[in-house]
Amino acid sequence: GAVVSQHPSWVICKSGTSVKIECRSLDFQATTMFWYRQFPKQSLMLMATSNEGSKATYEQGVEKDKFLINHASLTLSTLTVTSAHPEDSSFYICSARRDGYEQYFGPGTRLTVT
Amino acid sequence: QQQVKQSPQSLIVQKGGISIINCAYENTAFDYFPWYQQFPGKGPALLIAIRPDVSEKKEGRFTISFNKSAKQFSLHIMDSQPGDSATYFCAAKAGATNKLIFGTGTLLAVQP
């Protein structure tokens, strides 16, 4: 299967700072990338969908000014959590897909805001 | 109508037994039904997927059974092993959209 990587795998930041998470499709060009959030023992919640070169589409209730998504190329998408607060602590998972193919998930990034 | 209902929430199976997880949906536009396996601290991995033009798909010890009229599909894990202990998510997607709708997850524990 296709490989999707995320960096970093875990990050601790202080409240009020911003943190950037990278998502890369390593062996294919992803026309669409997705960002999910997962709380402990819960399902995946889709935050936003992005296509290369265009603005991300955010799900209802997700603050687009807080969770900045950039899909600069067919192999890279970034999620920046701005002015992070403890309630933003979560497991963030990206996913990538090319048209007509399966959706593959990254290994996730554990964010802890202190 | 966009929900996918998954049961049970947790499941304990003896080694060698059969694990069965069920999902139900309402949206008849769904045309792709994958199952994902997730280990703690890891991202979900695609296990097996089915489209509604077939009633069953088998890959190794994993089988999806699909009942279009009942709008239900299930995952069967034959000869369950301790290494299968993980959380399993069903999902569904309508062809016209990009979005996967996930079930609530089932925590499977296979006892040795």
Image (cartoon, coloured by chain):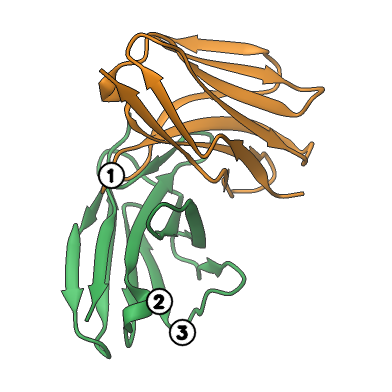
- Position in image of residue A4 (x %, y %): 29, 45
Q: In this view, does B110 lie above or below A67?
A: above
Q: Which of A33 and A38 is in front in this view?
A: A38
Residue A11 seen in render: yes
Question: Which residue is label 2 attached to?
Answer: A68
Mark 2 residue type: Leu
Answer with left or right where residue B100 lies relative to residue B78. right
Q: Residues within 10 Å of mark 3 (few under 14, many from 20)?
A: few
| Chain of the residue that carries numbered disc 3 in the rendered image | A
Query: Which chain, by letter, is green?
Result: A
Q: Which residue is identified by label 1?
A: B40
Alpha-carbon span between mark 2 and mark 1: 27 Å
A103 to A48, vertically: above or below: above
Q: What residue type is labelled 3?
A: Asp
Asked which secondary structure carries label 2, the reply is: strand
Q: Where residue B106 appears, x then y in whole percent?
A: 48, 37
Q: Do labels 3 and 2 share a chain?
A: yes
Q: Distance between the residues labelled 3 and 2?
A: 6 Å
Q: Which residue lies furthest to the bottom in this view?
A: A16
Label 2 marks a residue whose chain is A
Q: Mark 3 points at which residue?
A: A65
Q: Identify whether B30 is placed above or below A96.
A: above
Residue A28 image point, x, y percent: 33, 40
Image coordinates for residue A114, horizontal then vertical, percent? 22, 81
The residue nearer to you, when weighing A110 against A49, is A110
Q: Which chain is orange?
A: B
Q: What residue type is labelled 1?
A: Pro
The local secondary structure at tag 1 comes to: loop
Q: Nearer the viewer, mark 2 or mark 1?
A: 1
